[in-house]
């Protein structure tokens, strides 16, 4: 089984490699489904479009092929073709795609070019030996920063969680990040130890270290209520040197401003939940610029410090969140559905160690789990009564059976397995669900890196403008104090830059000043060692991997 999973990962990696043949818009990989009798005509069209054919599936009247998006648009007008649809990605079972990754359209843009960008994470370090990071070669850091210890360890957990949202690998286990191929450059600067605070001067010094490391994006899941003129100047200067700084709006649920997010030169990120509703804790003010998922976000934490919570039946495995204060343990029994909503119809027949499946609502989580235990149950699974997942707690109630919370959709799937044997596990793990604008911020930082990697001639302000122009408007019409421009959208921003160019004017590429080919030197993205080798006069990046800007 393990071998099988590895093979699938290798296949996925190589497929993604195929998508990245050119620096311009990568070819689209699509299903081309033809009408009866149309195969010959469609085969000719694909050949003349220079399409790369991956599969011929006669039983489905289908080809799977890669070609430029202009050719795909042409196919839609062909009378022999029934329909054309994206060949969407599938990942090995056992690895989940957190809802936020899908919500920001992360997997709709190839990260095969992401090696040309570096994201600097200023936080509490990273558990570098975590299975999601240990094999990644583009992760670097600044050691023993301001006495906080080694960047490659994380005594707090916060920094590892942020890093996972950006770059957890598509490796068949755990989760995937916005950039799952292991290509993106990460520079880790540890300003927080276990306690979790730093001075503004430490932040400014960290910003400088990010720049020295060739970072394009600086991700800061941190902030404070008081501004600093000097700190503001430092971010403004970094902005002028084409560094895109992104920070959390703050978690106090009020209208105050947090800094650095509320400097003009820094993007302020609000948090939404899986239903795109604003998080109650997300600070609202006129500096809020963009929004991203920040409620019940599953990501990496230092090994063993997280929690594994799952329920498995014969043909279904569901990941959940351990209820707060649930004991660890594993329990197996028949799955029974209990009605525990605080009404007259309440019933729970769990004698003999059954696993209780219970809907959220009406009475407290502790009351539900206690009722399950009292009627003889061995574990409780509570499913949400609205879309998405949730974080529940037993509030210290004296309960001895393990309990977990799952999404409404997973609850419905399990309900069709009532009567089957189910096993509930709650125990230490390498992943955890966190809430906060701190969790929203890395979604935006990673989308910025992803979109920028495909449009590397654009500058920081142009990437920022493209994300703002294409964000999914939420709440009141237009930019507002809760969501800013709205939910960040990777594919929409990518498409916007393809269609309109870096400056949004409709030209190709933007940047101006003559095309790179005309200058006779290296163009943007090519490997270099000194500034004078580049058309732009700027050769930046990590030693041994510097590229022209
Ligand atoms: Ca993974
Ligand atoms: Ca701002
Ligand atoms: Ca709005």
Image (tube, helix red, strand yellow):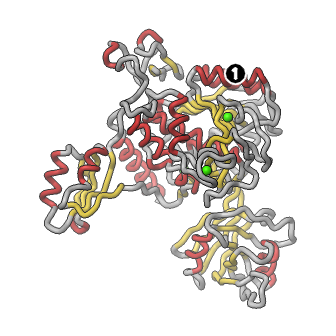
Secondary element under disc 1, as helix, strand or loop, is helix
In the rendered view, tell whether residue 157 sits above or below residue 392: above
Quarter of the image for residue 417 reads bottom right
Left or right side of 370 for 120: left
**Front position in the image: 234 or 399:** 234
Residue drawn 33% across the image and 47% down it? 28
Quarter of the image for residue 398 reads bottom right
Residue drawn 40% across the image and 17% down it? 513
**Residue lying farthest front?**
477
Left or right side of 426 for 78: left
- Residue 307 appears at what percent x and percent y? 70, 57
**Front position in the image: 127 or 381:** 381
Residue 302 visible in rendering: no
- Residue 63 appears at what percent x and percent y? 24, 57
Q: Crowding near pointer 1: few (<14 within 10 Å), some, many (20+)?
A: some
- Residue 264 appears at what percent x and percent y? 67, 30
**Residue lying farthest top?**
532
Q: Which residue is mark 1?
A: 234
Left or right side of 280 for 89: left
Residue drawn 36% across the image and 30% down it? 508
- Residue 46 appears at what percent x and percent y? 19, 50
Number of numbered discs present? 1
Residue drawn 33% across the image and 50% down it? 29
Residue 313 visible in rendering: yes
In the rendered view, tell whether residue 144 sits above or below residue 31: above
Q: Which quadrant of the picture is home to ligand 2?
A: top right
């Amino acid at each position: 089984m393990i071998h099988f999973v590895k093979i699938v990962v290798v296949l996925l990696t190589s497929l993604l490699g195929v998508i990245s043949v050119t620096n311009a818009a990568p070819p689209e990989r699509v299903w081309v489904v033809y009408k009866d009798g149309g195969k010959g005509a469609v085969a000719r069209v694909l050949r003349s479009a220079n399409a790369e054919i991956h599969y011929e599936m006669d039983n489905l009247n289908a080809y799977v092929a890669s070609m430029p998006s202009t050719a795909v648009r042409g196919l839609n007008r062909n009378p022999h073709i029934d329909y054309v649809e994206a060949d969407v990605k599938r990942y090995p079972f056992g690895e989940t795609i957190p809802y936020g990754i899908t919500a920001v359209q992360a997997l709709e843009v190839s990260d095969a070019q992401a090696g040309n960008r570096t994201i600097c994470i200023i936080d509490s370090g990273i558990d570098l030996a975590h299975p999601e990071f240990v094999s990644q070669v583009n992760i670097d850091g600044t050691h023993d920063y301001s006495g906080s210890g080694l960047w490659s360890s994380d005594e707090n957990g916060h920094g590892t969680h942020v890093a996972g949202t950006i770059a957890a690998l598509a490796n068949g286990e755990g989760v995937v990040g916005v950039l799952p191929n292991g290509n993106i450059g990460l520079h880790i600067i540890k300003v927080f130890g276990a306690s979790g605070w730093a001075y503004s001067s430490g932040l400014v010094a960290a910003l400088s270290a990010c720049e020295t490391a060739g970072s394009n994006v600086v991700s800061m899941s941190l902030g404070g209520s008081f501004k600093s003129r000097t700190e503001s100047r430092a971010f403004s200067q970094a902005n002028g040197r084409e560094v895109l700084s992104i920070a959390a709006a703050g978690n106090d649920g009020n209208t105050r401003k947090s800094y650095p997010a509320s400097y003009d030169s820094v993007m302020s990120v609000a948090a939404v939940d899986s239903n795109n509703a604003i998080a109650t804790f997300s600070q609202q003010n006129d500096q809020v610029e963009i929004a991203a998922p920040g409620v019940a976000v599953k990501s990496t934490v230092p090994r063993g410090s997280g929690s594994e919570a799952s329920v498995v039946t014969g043909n279904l495995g569901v990941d959940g969140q351990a209820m707060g204060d649930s004991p660890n343990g594993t329990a197996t029994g028949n799955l029974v559905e209990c009605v525990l909503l605080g009404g007259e119809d309440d019933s729970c027949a769990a004698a003999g160690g059954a696993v209780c499946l219970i809907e959220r609502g009406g009475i407290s989580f502790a009351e539900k789990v206690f009722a399950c235990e009292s009627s003889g149950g061995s574990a409780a699974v509570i499913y949400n009564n609205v879309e998405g997942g949730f974080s529940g707690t037993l509030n210290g109630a004296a309960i001895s059976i393990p309990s977990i919370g799952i999404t409404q959709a997973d609850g419905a799937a399990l309900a069709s397995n009532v009567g089957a044997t189910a096993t509930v596990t709650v125990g230490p793990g390498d992943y955890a669900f966190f809430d906060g604008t701190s969790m929203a911020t890395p979604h935006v930082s990673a989308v910025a890196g992803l979109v920028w990697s495909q449009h590397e001639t654009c500058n920081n302000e142009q990437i920022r403008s493209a994300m703002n122009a294409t964000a999914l408007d939420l709440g009141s019409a237009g930019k507002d104090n809760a969501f800013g421009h709205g939910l960040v959208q990777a594919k929409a921003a990518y498409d916007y830059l393809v269609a309109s160019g870096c400056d949004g004017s409709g030209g190709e590429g933007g940047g101006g000043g003559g095309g790179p080919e005309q200058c006779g030197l290296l163009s943007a993205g090519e490997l270099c060692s000194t500034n004078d080798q580049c058309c732009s006069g700027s050769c930046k990046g990590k030693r041994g991997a510097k590229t022209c800007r």
